[in-house]
């Protein structure tokens, strides 16, 4: 590669990884998302990049599995000569000591960089995520009411990683990331010079105080991101840096990178779908439920979540053929996972097994009928679904809404290459996002 990328990022799930891809592309940065850690030959064929992404599934892994997953990422970062290694988390920071541990990710990656401390960017305002004095707040859906994260109607009751602590310092301490210093939004608001001075005092405290292992930057509004990015990029020029947080990390750094390639911005218009569209909705969030209810242009297929989670072959085959028959006849199909029993029973279903089954179902459908556009709702479902077919990368096409990007699949399989795909987290997208996927959006 003639020019090292400025940033290498690892997305802890596929939906978040595509959001970061879109963030970079909208800033006119050359960006490509690889679906696994690429080798040197694959990177060379991709051409010069400002931002190199790797989509993963660490959010659903144990600390031991995360260690194995992230070791090659650390090695790639060191070999490329990039300046910032970004561990991309969900904007709600939902994680736990036993699954998707952000602390475990930092332990796996921190030796790859030169700086002895980790930068944590605590908010993503364009998605309604704000960090104030170390405490995280999040909107309930696009434009919805903002809640402290431990009182959020969905994230406080997440089936795998419920958020019971709003103070991110305490939340991360429970995952082994101790001595995290809060850089309040009141310091950030004073500009880059004042922020750098405050950071300097924090990182070099008077003896006998111990320097922090990490610094958590508040983000009250979008205007503060450029200030944070300017300070972090200047630091990264001296010592390579590990940065943790949502897509706002790349959003913050983008102005400082100054659009190194000088190319025109990527197309941002979603054109109408060239054929029937399949949406696989594996998320059980209220946001996705509203989107399903608003999907007027689809035939809905209700999936047997219990049978799928048990990997019942007959159930998967029946659903695949029902979905394929609808698509072959020219109709859009919305396939939704749900339990056939009431909600208390529904919560007993193995969410990871259901997500893996969703990926297998998508692969079966694509083997039966060629498609040019699909959508997947649900972070874990998206990760497993994309891993189920033979593709090596994604590039950005356009925004369908905040936190929701339409991407193009890159594959050595001609039948898959060029497939357009939307990966949407459970909390992301407007109510009409599935309709936009069919009819287009400006």
Image (tube, rainbow, N blue to C red):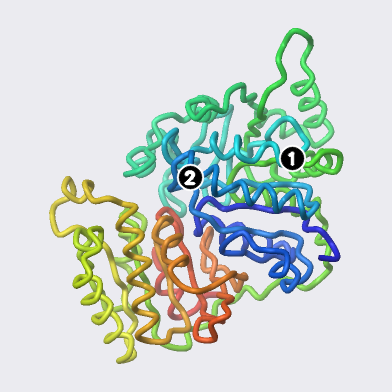
At a point 80% along the width and 25% down the height, the residue shown is 200
| Quarter in which the C terminus is drawn | bottom right
At a point 74% along the width and 40% down the height, the residue shown is 113
In the picture, the disc for residue 113 is 1
| Quarter in which the N terminus is drawn | bottom right
At a point 51% along the width and 44% down the height, the residue shown is 66
Disc 2/disc 1 C-alpha distance (Å): 21 Å
Looking at the rendered structure, the number of numbered marks drawn on it comes to 2
Q: Circle 1: is it few (<14), some (14-19), or many (20+) Cα within 10 Å?
A: many
Residue 355 x/y as whole percent: 35, 59
Relative to 287, 14 lies left or right: right
Secondary element under disc 1, as helix, strand or loop, is: loop
Q: Quadrant of residue 428?
A: bottom left
Residue 424 x/y as whole percent: 45, 61
Residue 128 x/y as whole percent: 52, 47
Residue 225 x/y as whole percent: 69, 44
In the picture, the disc for residue 322 is none
Relative to 393, 382 lies left or right: left
């Amino acid at each position: 590669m003639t020019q090292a990328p400025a940033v290498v990022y690892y997305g802890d799930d596929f939906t978040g990884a595509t959001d970061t891809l879109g963030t970079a592309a909208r800033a006119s940065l050359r960006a490509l998302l690889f679906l696994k850690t690429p080798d040197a030959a694959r990177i060379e064929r991709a051409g010069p990049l400002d931002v190199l992404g790797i989509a993963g599934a660490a959010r659903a892994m144990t600390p031991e599995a995360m260690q194995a997953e992230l070791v090659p990422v650390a090695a790639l970062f060191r070999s490329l000569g990039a300046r910032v290694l970004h561990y991309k988390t969900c904007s709600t920071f939902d994680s736990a000591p036993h699954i998707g541990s952000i602390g475990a990710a930092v332990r796996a990656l921190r030796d790859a960089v030169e700086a002895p401390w980790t930068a944590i960017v605590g908010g993503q305002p364009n998605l309604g995520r704000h960090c104030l004095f170390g405490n995280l707040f999040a909107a309930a859906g696009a434009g919805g009411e903002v809640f402290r994260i431990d009182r959020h109607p969905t994230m406080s009751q997440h089936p795998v990683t419920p958020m019971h602590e709003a103070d991110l310092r305490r939340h991360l301490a429970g995952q082994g990331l101790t001595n995290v210093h809060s850089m309040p939004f009141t310091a950030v608001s004073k500009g880059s010079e004042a922020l750098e001075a405050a950071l300097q005092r924090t990182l070099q405290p008077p003896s006998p105080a111990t320097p922090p292992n990490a610094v958590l930057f508040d983000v009250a509004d979008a205007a503060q991101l450029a200030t944070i990015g300017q300070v972090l990029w200047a630091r990264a020029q001296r010592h390579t840096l590990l940065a943790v947080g949502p897509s706002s990390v790349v959003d913050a750094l983008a102005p400082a990178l100054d659009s190194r390639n000088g190319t025109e911005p990527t197309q941002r218009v979603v054109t109408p779908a060239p054929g029937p569209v399949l949406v696989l909705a594996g998320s059980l969030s209220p946001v996705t439920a509203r989107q399903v209810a608003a999907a007027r242009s689809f035939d809905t297929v209700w999936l047997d979540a219990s049978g799928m989670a048990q990997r019942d072959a007959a159930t998967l085959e029946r659903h695949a053929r029902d979905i394929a028959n609808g698509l072959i006849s020219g109709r859009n199909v919305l396939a939704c996972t749900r339990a056939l029993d009431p909600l208390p029973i529904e919560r007993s279903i193995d969410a990871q097994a259901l997500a893996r089954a969703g990926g297998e179902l998508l692969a079966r459908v694509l083997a039966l009928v060629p498609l040019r556009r699909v959508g997947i709702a649900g972070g874990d479902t998206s990760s497993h679904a994309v891993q189920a077919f033979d593709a090596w990368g994604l590039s950005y096409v356009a925004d369908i809404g905040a936190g929701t990007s339409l991407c193009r699949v890159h594959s050595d399989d001609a039948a898959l290459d060029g497939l357009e795909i939307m990966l949407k987290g459970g909390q992301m997208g407007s109510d009409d996002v599935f309709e936009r996927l069919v009819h287009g959006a400006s």
